[in-house]
Amino acid sequence: MITPLEIILIALVAVSISILGNIGGFGGGIFIVPLLISAFSHESDIVAGTVLLAMIFPTAVGTVLAWRKDEVYWKFGLVMGIPSAAGAVAGSFVASEIDDLVAVIIICSLALIFSIRMLTYAIQNGRKKSKKKIEEVDVSQNEKFLAKILRIKPVMTIEHKGFVYEISMTLVFIFGVLFGIMAGLFGISGGWLQTPLMIVFFGLSPLVASGTSLFVILLKATVGGVTHIFLGNINWILLLILAISMPIGAVIGNFLKHKMKGKQVSLIIGVALLLVTIFTIVFFFV
């Protein structure tokens, strides 16, 4: 049973996390799941199902707001989102078999790795004295990072605001499946992995990567969340708290995101992932 104090605390945390999530293009499950497991002692499979289902609401808001700014690549999102949705279903069926400690270790390890990568990316791009628009892609970064692999056929071409992107559909599909499985297993949307990969690996700008990632999360959250309903992995009171509070954070986060430059968005993603690593370790092991 959730106490009134817990309701208030969870709602406040959910709003704050949703603000960060909308800026960085991730749903916020990477923060909320460890918190609910470690600080509020909820079971991991129930948390995974409830949080994943709750992600529908803030990501729907974030996707619409990003679409209005022309910051969603629908084609890219569908190629990654459809296999992600399938992976989320598969992960949902085995979520109850994952030990809480194992889940926390996996989440923290991945968060730390991508935190370091995004901080490095932000610092390197911050040193470049260029007057590029926010939407412009750092092509040299793509070329240095396994350029040949990025062009594994079939390749899809995306044109956006005068820029042309050539992206391997095979790689997008593979990453989509992996992110979906993680979403179903742990209740984390996977956006904290998607967004850095879209920026560093596929060369999308931070704002466009953020908007497209929210769309992908919306797809797999819908499919994976519904699957968890049938599996009985939903705490309906907790879901109501998150469904009301997180869209508020999404609106605030979208407003703040467009007051920032691309490198600032990348920096926020890196710092946020570093904080969740520290936060989770402290609450779970101390």
Image: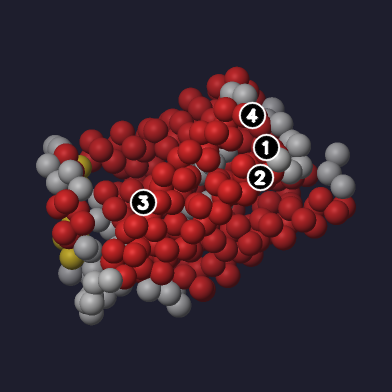
In this view of the protein, which residue sits in the foreground, 81 or 98?
A: 98
Lateral position of residue 262 relative to residue 90, left or right = left
SS for dot 4: helix
Query: Disc 3 vs disc 1: which is toward the camera?
Result: 1
Provide the residue designation for mark 1.
285
Provide the residue designation for mark 4.
100
* Among the two numbered marks 2 and 3 on one chain, the one whose residue lies closer to the N terminus: 3
Q: Are marks 2 and 1 in contact (CB under 8 Å)?
A: yes
Picture residue at 63% right of the left edge, 62% below the top = 16
Q: Position of residue 163 (x, y in %)?
A: 18, 65
Lateral position of residue 89 relative to residue 12, left or right = left
Q: CA distance from mark 2 to mark 3?
A: 22 Å
Q: Residues within 10 Å of mark 1 (few under 14, many from 20)?
A: few
Query: Disc 2 vs disc 3: which is toward the camera?
Result: 2
Label 1 amino acid? Phe
Q: CA distance from mark 3 to mark 1?
A: 25 Å
Quadrant of the frame with the N terminus: top right
Provide the residue designation for mark 2.
282
Query: Disc 4 vs disc 1: which is toward the camera?
Result: 1
Q: Position of residue 142 (x, y in %)?
A: 19, 53
Provide the residue designation for mark 3.
117
Query: Disc 2 vs disc 4: which is toward the camera?
Result: 2
